[in-house]
Every structure is written in C-alpha cells, then in structure tokens.
Amino acid sequence: MTLRKTLSSAVRGFGISLLVVVAGFPVYWLFTTATHTTAELFGGQVQWLPDLRRFLTSFTSATSGVPMLRWLSNSAVVAFGTTFLSLIIAILAAYALSRYRFRGKGVFGFALFATQMLPEALLVVPLYSIFLTFGLLDNLTGLVLSDTAFAMPVAVWILKSAMDGVSLEIEESARVDGCPRYAMLTQIMLPLIAPSIAAAAVITFFEGWNEYLFANTFITDEQKWPASKGLASFIGEFVTPLNHVMAAALMFTLPAIVFFLFVQRRIVSGLTAGSVKG
C-alpha cells in the first residue's frame, strides 16, 4: 500500500512538473530571446540560455523612445474597467434569469447567447459611427464599453449556471427571516458562487487586456494606445528588432499571468470553502 502511494505521488509529481515546464516554456523563451541581439538570434545557432548580462539593457532599449509604461497602464484601465462593468451587469442579469419569471425571458437569454455568434470585425463600422456621434473615439471608455458588450454575455451564462445550482430553500429561509431581495443577492448568493465569479472575472479581464481590433480602429493617439497595439508598432517596414519585441511582449504578458494566478487562488479557495463544516 505504501509502495502504491509512493508511485502514485511520483507519477503525480512528474505530471505536474511536466505541465509546469510546458506552460512556462513560452515565457522562458520570451525572456531568453529578449536578452540576445538580433545577430545572435539569426546567427544559425539556437540560443537556449538567456544572457543575464544584457537583462537591463534589453528591457531599457525596448522601452526607450516609446511610452511602454503608459501603454500598459492603458491596458490595465481597459481590462479592469471591462471586468468591473461586465461583472456588475452580469450578476444582476444572471440573478434575474435564474430567479425571476418574466415575459421574454427565453428570448432575452437566447439573445445574449447569440451575441457570441457575431464576429467583432462585423461591428467595427457601426460602432465607429456610434462612437463618433458620442465623442468616444480616442477614449478608453469606448474600448471598455465595446469589450464589455462581448464579455458580459459570457459572464451572464457562467453566473446563471452557478446560481441555478444554489438551492431555492436557502433564499426562502432568508425571506422568512425578513431578508430583503438585495441582501439575499449580496450576502447569500454571491458568497456561494464566488468561484464562478472568479472564473467570469478571468474571462472578462483577458477580453479587455488582449484588446486590439477596436483599439486599432478607434484609438489614434499614441499616448492612449493599449499595450497590444503598442506591441504591433514594433514591427517595422524593413526590419523588426525581435529582441525588443520579445522584451516588450514579456512586459505585456507578466501582469496577465500574475492576475490569473491571483484569481486562480480565489477559485480554489471558493471551491473548498464549503467542504468542511465548522
């Protein structure tokens, strides 16, 4: 029995280590490529190890002459704005679809689902006309609104599915004790579906963080570019400094990884919160 447990632990540890290596290799390759010159990268010999002596030089060269930190802050504004607005609307809409009966409920739910069938490129021209009318061009608010329109329906269905799994008896008991409807949502429902909220937050955050199409169309002011569009500007007509591109790409990737790891811990803690009775 002990030998079986040892072998099981060894296999599990090997599998986890393999997954970590596979998942982390792209980030390692970004870092390695960023610390070598273009001549070394195209010299015919694969550079497997990073040159740590050029660490600071590579990243300072990549950000010199371009407002990289400003671009990253713009991406953060769009991502967190999309996440906040999407979750607020999605929680209310999901609760209505899960707990209320009203005329047109099925049509409304299907309409939210149908929005995912429309490609973003199909709506660029009408959105441009609307944003021009309301003065939302060259404005990060416009990007938040457009990304929310595509991320929020997904969050609604994730949260609705989670709310459907919560027993109605819990809310009925709270109603008997005089708990108002808003308090049932905020104090009873939301803590129970915290893992699903975290999962929805991940999806909506990356929708805003990876924004490129609308930013490339609606934002012309270089100071208001998100980092995704800023990275595309590194591609030159005759030459592209690959090490600078990889250094900037690493700076763009790390905040998203940190956010995912932070929220992923909340997903796990939420899933295990009710497993032990005090």
Image (cartoon, helix red, strand yellow):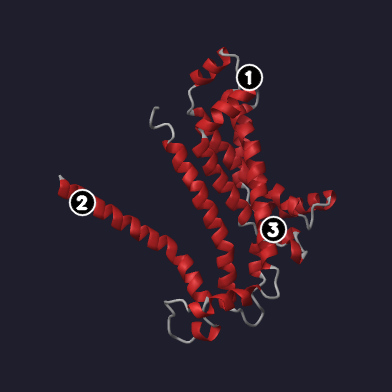
- Image location (x, y in percent) of residue 179: 60, 18
The amino acid on which the numbered mark 1 sits, given as a three-letter code, is Pro
Q: Circle 1 — which element?
A: loop
Image quadrant holding the C terminus, namely top left
- Image location (x, y in percent) of residue 182: 64, 24
Q: Earlier in the sequence, mark 3 or mark 2?
A: 2
Q: Are marks 3 and 1 in contact (CB under 8 Å)?
A: no
Residue at numbered disc 3: 74
The amino acid on which the numbered mark 3 sits, given as a three-letter code, is Asn
Asked if 85 appears above or below 127 in the picture, the reply is above
User: Nearest the camera: 215 or 255?
Assistant: 255
Residue at numbered disc 1: 180
| Residue 2 shown left or right of residue 98 in the figure | left
Residue 125 tag number: none
Residue at numbered disc 2: 6
Image quadrant holding the N terminus, namely top left
Q: Residues within 10 Å of mark 1 (few under 14, many from 20)?
A: few
Which residue sits at x=70%, y=72%?
A: 66
Which residue sits at x=53%, y=79%?
A: 54
